[in-house]
Image: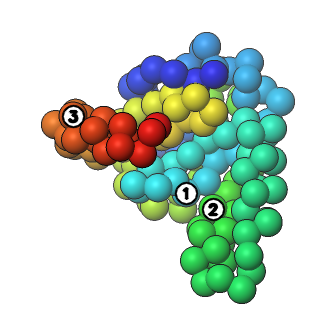
Amino acid sequence: MFIGEYHHNIDEKGRLAVPIKFRNQLEKGAVVTKGLDNCLFLYTQSEWEKLADKLAKLPINKSNSRGFARFMLAGAMDIEIDKQGRVILPDYLRKFAGIKKKAVIAGLYNRLEIWDEEKWEKYKQGAEEESENIAETLGEMNA
């Protein structure tokens, strides 16, 4: 399970240190892809396979299904953790998420999200300000 918020720097080669507590889970393989809200999603290989299977089963005759599958699958990249516990984030994914020098890794149960630090702070502030409304809406949905 991934939880917590971690701040790290991206080096000139696009390498990002993975928090120590998550490295064992990612050693067997990981996939990074474009995420929602202009961040990156990082999955273990097994979680990625579950998601990819669901995406492959979306109806091909629906434009939104095709578009979302393309968004998630075409932008995906297998990654490995090096001996120093770092992953290389491909340039095209860093550009997509606007990640420059400082990044935040946020644990969200079955995935990690990787954010540009400034974008994360703005997003987090807005979510915290709306937390009561969000909770109320989710309560109405019996979540």
Question: Please, which residue is most extreme toward the left here?
Answer: 129
Label 3: few (<14), some or many (≥20) within 10 Å? few
Q: How is the image coloured?
A: rainbow
Q: Nearer the viewer, residue 65 or 79?
A: 65
Tag shown at residue 34: 1
Could you say where residue 68 lies in the image, as x and y percent from the top left? 60, 69
Tell me which amino acid carries mark 2.
Answer: Met
C-alpha distance separating marks 2 and 3: 30 Å
Q: Is residue 66 above or below residue 27?
A: below
Tag shown at residue 72: 2
**Mark 1–mark 3 CB contact (< 8 Å):** no
Kind of element beneath mark 1 = strand
Q: What residue sits 66% from the left and 77% below the top?
A: 66
Q: Earlier in the sequence, mark 1 or mark 3?
A: 1
Tag shown at residue 132: 3
Question: Please, which residue is most extreme toward the top here?
Answer: 21
Tell me which amino acid carries mark 3.
Answer: Glu
Quarter of the view holding residue 64: bottom right
